[in-house]
Amino acid sequence: MLRKLGYAGAVALVGAEADPPYERPPLSKAYLAGEEPFERMMMRPKEAWAELNIDLLSGRKIVSLDPAANEARCSDGERITYGKLIYAAGDCAAHANRYAGGAVIRLESVQNAHDQAAVAAASIAGAAKPYDAVPWFWSDQYDLKLQTAGLSNGHDKAVLRGDPDSRSFSVIYLKDGRVIALDCVNATHDYAQGRRLVATGGACDHETIADPGYPLFKPTARKG
Ligand SMILES: Cc1cc2nc3c(=O)[nH]c(=O)nc-3n(C[C@H](O)[C@H](O)[C@H](O)COP(=O)(O)OP(=O)(O)OC[C@H]3O[C@@H](n4cnc5c(N)ncnc54)[C@H](O)[C@@H]3O)c2cc1C
């Protein structure tokens, strides 16, 4: 992301794992089922990091930081000096989220890791932008594609759209007549449209949106 934004400074990526960065979700899905080799989980081939002029410092566990000396210390005693230090050790950062009514939350999902990384990268590259992404999440569980948009905390109505027996349906959460979140099961159309509905905060009639034949979001026609 930093390179995409034109950042030309030195970048080192430190990770405790011996392997280059890889996606976690397949660990409990395709990789676990033996359907996907480890190489397919890698974010990019090892050599691509060098092509981007990024130093991959794998297999190094940082145990302490010395901000005065601009140094990170590794478990084996190695010291890494840095200019700017960004660390995402553990998981997605806690943040005040407007979709949670301004409460500080931590969203543990690939989406949030990517969205927050994009904001951090923009800030380092000198084009700071606020973090304001609609929370969303996906997971594949056997034949079920689970997708969520928004946060359902505080809803005052839950509307079922579709028939759970058909294994394709959504639950739509409203608060004060506005859609604040959706849980979608094998219902990618509902998810895609519902996410826009959550983002725009439009008012909805709960009886209408319960009808799967009714599109959840209709973009406003542009003139000209
Ligand atoms: C098995 C599994 C299945 C998942 N399935 C889904 C899914 O279906 N959908 C979904 O949205 N999310 C899923 N997740 C969650 C998602 O993968 C995480 O939310 C996401 O990886 C968080 O990204 P991150 O970069 O914040 O943290 P991580 O991916 O955990 O990366 C943190 C990095 O920091 C490094 N690190 C930590 N401490 C140190 C240290 N002291 N020194 C050096 N390096 C350190 C680690 O080595 C690691 O490389 C799944 C997670 C797991 C484990």
Image (spheres, rainbow, N blue to C red):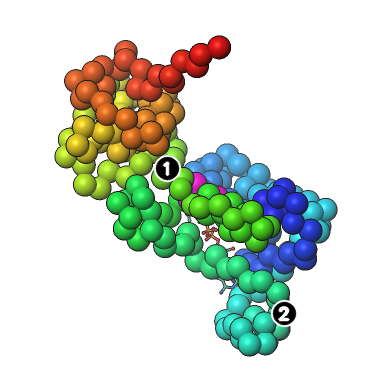
Q: Does ligand 1 reach within 8 Å of label 1's beta carbon?
A: no
Q: Disc 1 marks which residue?
A: 134
Residue found 46% across the figure and 48% down from its top: 132
Q: CA distance from mark 2 to mark 1?
A: 36 Å
Question: Above or below — where is 9 with respect to 97?
Answer: below
Indicate the position of residue 75 as horizontal and vertical percent values.
62, 83
Give whichever of 6, 24 is nearer the camera.
6
Residue 10 placed where, x, y %? 77, 66
**73 is higher (above) or lower (below) than 146:** below
Q: What residue is disc 2 on? A: 81
Mark 2 neighbour class, 10 Å CA radius: few under 14, some 14 to 19, many 20 or more: some
Q: Which residues are magenta?
A: 110-114
Q: In the shown orientation, is residue 50 left or right of residue 218?
A: right
Residue at 43% in and 55% down: 108
Between 39 and 155, the one nearer to me in the picture:
155
For the question of whether residue 183 can be seen, the reply is no
Q: Is mark 2 within 8 Å of ligand 1?
A: no
Look at label 1 and name its amino acid: Val
Amino acid bearing label 2: Thr
Q: Quadrant of residue 170?
A: top left
Disc 1 secondary structure class: loop
- Give coordinates of residue 28: x percent, y percent: 48, 48
Magenta-colored segment: predominant secondary structure: helix
- Which residue is rendered at x = 72% and y = 66% of the image? 12
In the rendered image, residue 113 lying in the magenta stretch gets the answer: yes
Find out whether residue 202 is within the magenta segment.
no
Please rate how many residues cluster around mark 1, counting C-alpha atoms within 10 Å: few if below 14, some from 14 to 19, many from 20.
Answer: many
Q: Is residue 10 above or below residue 65?
A: above
**Residue 11 at x, y = what percent?**
73, 64
Image quadrant holding the C terminus, namely top right
Given this view, does label 2 or label 1 mark the residue nearer the observer? 1
